[in-house]
Structures are given as structure tokens and as C-alpha cells.
Amino acid sequence: MAELIIMPKLGFNMDEGKLVQWYKKEGDSVEKGEPLFSIETDKTSIDIEATGSGVVRKILLEEGESVPVTLPIAIIGTADENIDILMAETGSAPSLQPAPQNKTAAPAPAPAPSAGQGGRDYQVIVIGGGPGGYVAAIKAAQMGKKTAVVEKDKFGGVCMNRGCIPTKALLRSVEALKEIKEHEKFGVVGLDASSAMLDLGLVQKRKTNVVKQLVGGIGSLLKKNGVIPMEGEGTIKDAHTVVVNGKEFTTDHIIIASGSTIKSLPIPMNPAMEILNSDSMLEISDIPEDVTVIGGGVIGIEFAYFLANLGTKVTVIEFLDRIIPMVDEEITRQVTGLLESLGVTVHTSAKVTEIKAKEVVFEKDGKQHTVPATKVLMAVGRGPDLGGIPCEALGIKTEKGAIVTDSTLKTSVDNIYAVGDVNGKAMLAHTASAEAIIAVENICGHRKEMNYETIPSAIYIQPEIASAGLTEEQARKKFGNVKVGKFPLLANGKAKVAGEENGLIKVIIEPRFNEIVGVHIFSIHATDMIAEAVLAMNLEATAEEVAMTVHPHPTVSEIYHEAFHAALDKAIHF
């Protein structure tokens, strides 16, 4: 596939670049990783390597000329490939002419988006305005595509309105309560912590304000980037037509980002029992006396932690043999102990069979058990939302209720892509956003592939849980005798100062090259620190490289190099 080569942005303040030298001329072959051209920024000159192999079909910028960053400067493709479409996208825009040498001059504006092929209304229509959809729309508009995004509810999707953000707002409130109750160990006196409690009305007000501000920010971002927002339910009529509120819009490409819906269990449920889900739990205005949580995954455990800190009697019933099974087993054991210390009762390897008027019935070890309950939280996960998408009629392949996509996020229909929860690969907001960018890059002719091996996951109880890569069990199955390094929070100075000494970091190293294959953290600030592990794994860093990276002292991040020293049998502080 032919690819547009753009002037790269090599620094935060870099607005334009000057092309110093082409190392290839039109008609020359070039291999991926081979120097293609050199550019001059305001700081230095640097060689830029080819991101793919092919033939230099067209050079759009001559040596000595300057252009704003991200504008096209060349086209690489196969020798016989038709590049007319890409040439049409570059056009003869004035922005490709030499830029003024006055460094204070503003960069030339990008050409206005044109309509789609054959007079279609748009070049890209995105269905869904969540973290996958709105990011896809903004990215497409930034890359010069005339783009619309359709949202049937509220922009920001489940994550911002009924998931990530409101949940964390509630959890922050119980953390504030916890800090007040523990005030004396930090030398704060004169407070009657025994009477401290949360006013859920005020908690809900704060949560609503946080969500409102962030959702409003999305609208501003769409407007700033020239995206056309459409409010209403979008349905796909055919591969090039989307219907919104009864009106048809044609488009070159469709990106499906319709998100997910709440799942439930196909069991008898007495209507006399109040059954909550993750949506209704976010709106509670009174502290429940008791809640039985069905499902010990991320949603169930975060809400169990929240409720337990409110003083609610909580029971968790999980079908698998442990809660949060995606987390390394050693950390799961510690989390189970933490929850039990808060008064939570945890039943694992338990199958819920019926919800009665005042109790929940489940099977465990071949016997029937019951739990008295006044409220039940159904937290058995979410499933892809295929509403308005006639997959069979369109020829879109699905498996287990999810749209099948390749590594470029393309479906079985060439011009239709699917990102986020709807493809079922990794149902996380940050995954959806990353997929959105990959999908748009491919729509614009840049071959990019999604890597799921180092997607981080996060659970926002306290201490937090964050992980990336393989668990120890998975790594041993794949690599055999792996190396494992651990470091407890109780030996970290900053954690001790913070009074948060529970938890550990666990790193897993494959035995041949000492390459990092898994990192698991149960610690304060874990969700903020996991990105270091993701970056290291993406760069194929070794244990030695991280161990020798200087981390500031005192910080919780020091647990990284301590754990990697331990993995190499050279532990320093433990």
C-alpha cells in the first residue's frame, strides 16, 4: 500500500522542518530502516529512516525547502501501484511551497478537507463518540479527512459518563474519608474521626461536575479540529452509507466505535430484589446496608472496595477460582486479604444459580449455599454493542458477539474499521484510543499495526493494581525457567513516609536475553507508574537496562530498579 511520507515532528516546539538532503531519488528502491532523508530543525540535523519498504514514487519537497510538520513530502509505494488518490490528497497546496524564513511566522494552514470520492458527503464517518470514536474523528480530521462523528447518547462514551471517570471520582471520595480516619498516625489531632462519613449527595455532585467538565472538553476538541458532530443513533445502511435520524450520509470509510453494553446472567431473578448494575451503582444516594456483588472482575472489585469503605456489608461471589483473574496470582492473594480486612466476604469457584427476594443462591464444591441480601450488584462484565450494525448483511465477520478485525483494525469489509469494546480484543479506554489512531493511520495510507502484548491494565482500589505483559504463570508456560524479581513496598522509603506500605512489585524476565515480559504492581501510584514498564517492553529493554536507570529518591518508582536488581540476583535493599 502506498504511503505518504510527512515532515516529522521531532520536538514539542518544532513547527516546521527544512529538508537538507534526499538519500534516494524518484524510482529508487528503499528498505525499511534505511536512511531516506535528512532534515534540519532549530536545534540539529538528523537522518530520518524509511518506515516501510518500497519504491520512491514521488518527491514533493526539494532539498533546501521548508514545510510545517506533518505535511506530505514524498510518496513511497510499489513500482506499479496507482498513487493518483494520494497525489490528489497532496494536491498543489501552497503549504508545499517554501515556507517563509521568518521564524516568527505562523505555520501555513493545512488544506481544507474535501468531500469523499465520487462526491460522497464525507471521507470518514465514525459511529460512537467514546474514547475510541472521538479520538478517531479528531485524528482523521487532523490528517486532512472530512470527518463526522455520530453519538446517540453523550460524547465521552461509557468511560467518561458511566465508567472510568465517575467511578474514580467516587473512589477518590472514599480515599479522602480513609485519610481523615487515619489522621492521628500523621500527627493531626483535634478531629473527631469517629463521626466522619461521606455525604453521598455531595459526592455525587462532585462526580457530576468532573464528568461535565471533561465531556464539555470533548466538544471543544471536536470543534477545534473541524469534526462535524452528529447527535442521534447511527445505523449502517451499506458499506458507504450511514443513516442518522432518518437522513442518509455517504462516506469513503466507516469506523465503528459503538462500545459495549452491560451483561447479565441468564438465571431466575425475583423482581422483589433490587438488582443494581454498574450504571445504577454510580447514582446511589444512600449508603446500602448490604450488597452482594456477583462477579469478581475489575468492576466488581472496585465497587466492593468502595462500598466496604462506606461501611456496607459486602459479599463477592466469583465463578472462577480467584478474583481479578487477569492479575498475577500472587497479587490476587494480597488483594483478597486486603478486601477481607475491610470486612468483605469473598466466595470463589462459586456459580450463582438464582436471585430470590431476600437472598442469592450459589453452588460451591457441589453444595448449594445462600447469602442473605437486600441489594445485588450484577458485575459480570460488558459485551460488544452491535446495535445498528447489520454485520451479516454487510459481510462483517463476527466471533462470540464481537467484530473481527486484523492488526490494522480493518474488518472483513475493506473500507470499514472497528475500534474499542466492539471488537472485544481488550475492553479498555486507552486501548480504544490507541486502536483509533492505528485505524486512521491505515485509512490514510500509512501501514501501522496494533500491538496488544503490552497493553497496561489498572484497578483503582488502594493500593492500586497495574500490570503489563505476562503473569508469572503465563511466562513459565511460554519461556520455561523465567527469572522473577520482587520488591515489597514496606522496604520503600517514600511508601513508608506516605503510610502506605502494603503491596509489592513483581517483574518477570525471559531467561535468554533478560528481556522484560511482565510487570505487576500492587502499590500506591501503581497506575501512574506502569507506563514505564510499557515503554521498556515496547523498546525491548533488558532487566540490566532498567536496573541501571537512575530513579529519583525518595520516590515509589525506586521499586522498579530494586525489583530488576533482584531478578538478576543482585538485590540491593532487600
Image (cartoon, rainbow, N blue to C red):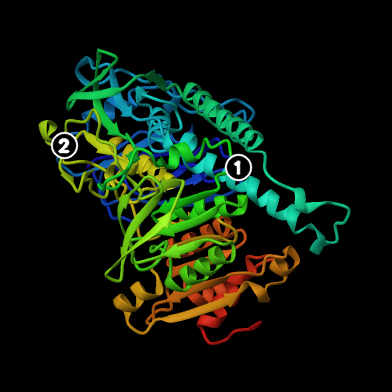
x 48%, y 50%: residue: 291
Q: Which mark is residue 297?
A: none
Up/down of 387 relative to 111, above or below: below
Q: Residue furthest right?
A: 190
Pick the residue in front: 199 or 551: 199
Residue 11 seen from this side: no
Q: Residue at x 34, y 72 (%)?
A: 474
**Apparent side of residue 357 relative to residue 302 in the rendered image (left or right):** left
Q: Measuring 33% from the left and 43% from the top, which residue is drawn there?
A: 421
- Please tell me how crowded label 1 is: few (under 14), some (14-19), or many (20+) other residues with Cα within 10 Å: few
Instruction: Give 320 or 509, whichever is nearer the viewer.
Output: 320
Q: Position of residue 306 (x, y in %)?
A: 56, 50
Name the residue rendered at 41%, 64% in the picture: 347
Residue position marked by numbered label 2 in the rendering: 413
Please, is residue 95 above or below residue 537 in the view?
Answer: above
* Label 1 SS: loop
Residue 297 location, quadrant: bottom left
| Dot 2 amino acid type | Val
Residue 364, given in percent of the width and then of the height, sits at 32, 67
Q: Are marks 2 and 1 in contact (CB under 8 Å)?
A: no
| Circle 2 or circle 1, nearest the eye | 2
What separation in Å lies between label 2 and label 1 (alpha carbons)?
44 Å
Chain-order first, disc 2 or disc 1: 1
Tag 2, which secondary structure?
A: loop
Which residue is label 1 attached to? 42
* Extreme-top residue of the structure: 247
- Give left or right: position of 348 versus 561: left
> Residue type at mark 1?
Asp
Quarter of the image with the N terminus is top left
- Give residue 546's position: percent from left, percent from top: 54, 71
